[in-house]
Structures are given as structure tokens and as C-alpha cells.
Amino acid sequence: MLIEFLLSNFEIFIFFSVLLIVFAFIFLFLLQLQNSRLNKESIFQFAESLQNTNKELREYLVVLGNLLENQKKELINISEKIIFIERELNRLGNVKGSENNLNVAINMVRQGNSREEIIKKTGLREDDVEAIYTYYKK
């Protein structure tokens, strides 16, 4: 009886089965389309955040480059000052070798002699005498 019922309505069962399969494929297609849209939106959001991160990184690197350039200039200035100080120390070392002249120049400054007199008597350079005059004048 059940078999007869199935056989007599076989075309109807096949039609509904095929119809069910078609609706299932349409449903799966729509579901896949929705997932694809969500994935597309998330990919665009990720690309946008990546682009923003790249912009921030680029700005940070520019600022860092400027900072390093300023530090490089400062280091160059400091090294030039160190070289100048080394030259002055060497020059003062040479002058210090003639401490008698320095002592004479200091005493002359304390006595109130002029710069020209000190240069003539000691043989020191004008800038040396100027430094001594600045520090030891009463």
C-alpha cells in the first residue's frame, strides 16, 4: 500500500525533491553571497586600517629622520667645539711651557701695565694676553 502510494505519486515526489534541491542551492548561493559581502567589507576595513597605519608610520619615520638630522648637526657642532678645545689646550700647553712668561704677564696685569707692554716684554700672543688681562685684572 505504501509502495503503491509512492509509485503513483512518484512524479510529485521527484518534483518536490528537485524543487527542494533547487531552493537549497538558491539558499546556499544567497548565504555565500552574503558571506562574500561581509568578507569584502572586512577586507576593505583591514585595508583602510593598514593604510592609516602606513601613514602614521611614514609620519613617525619623517619625524624620526628630522630628529636624527638635528642630532647629527648637534654632534657636528659638538665635535667642532671639541676640536677647538683640543687646539686651545695644545696651544695653552705650549704657552704653559713658558710659565715664566705667563707669571710675568700676570704680575704685569696686576700692576696695571698695558697690553702692548705685556706683549713686548713676554712675547705672548695678543689673544693670550687678552685672556690673562680679562682674568687677572683687578
Image: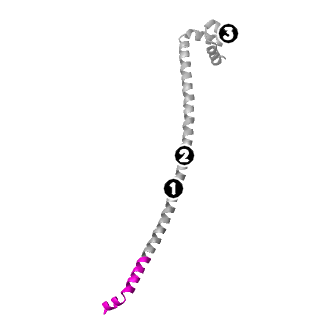
Q: Which quadrant holds residue 81?
A: top right
Q: Which residue is mark 3?
A: 116
Position of 100 relative to 6 (above/below): above
Q: Is residue 32 above or below residue 112?
A: below
* Residue 127 location (% of width, % of height): 63, 15
Q: Residues within 10 Å of mark 3 (few under 14, many from 20)?
A: few
Magenta segment: 1-23
Are circles 1 and 2 on residues that touch, CB within 8 Å?
A: no
Q: Residue at x 53, y 17 (%)?
A: 90
**Residue 72 drawn at (x, y percent):** 54, 33
- Looking at this view, is 33 or 13 the one in front? 13
User: Which of labels 2 and 3 is toward the front?
Assistant: 2
Q: Earlier in the sequence, mark 3 or mark 1?
A: 1
Q: Earlier in the sequence, mark 2 or mark 3?
A: 2
The residue at 39%/81% (across/down) is 17
According to the picture, the residue beneath numbered tag 2 turns out to be 58
- Amino acid type shown at disc 2: Arg
Name the residue located 51 percent from the left edge and 56 percent from the top edge. 47
Three-letter amino acid code at the position of disc 3:
Glu
Residue at 48% across / 63% down in the picture?
Answer: 39
State the residue position of label 1.
Answer: 47
The image quadrant where one finds the N terminus is bottom left
Disc 2/disc 3 C-alpha distance (Å): 62 Å
- Residue 80 is inside the magenta segment: no
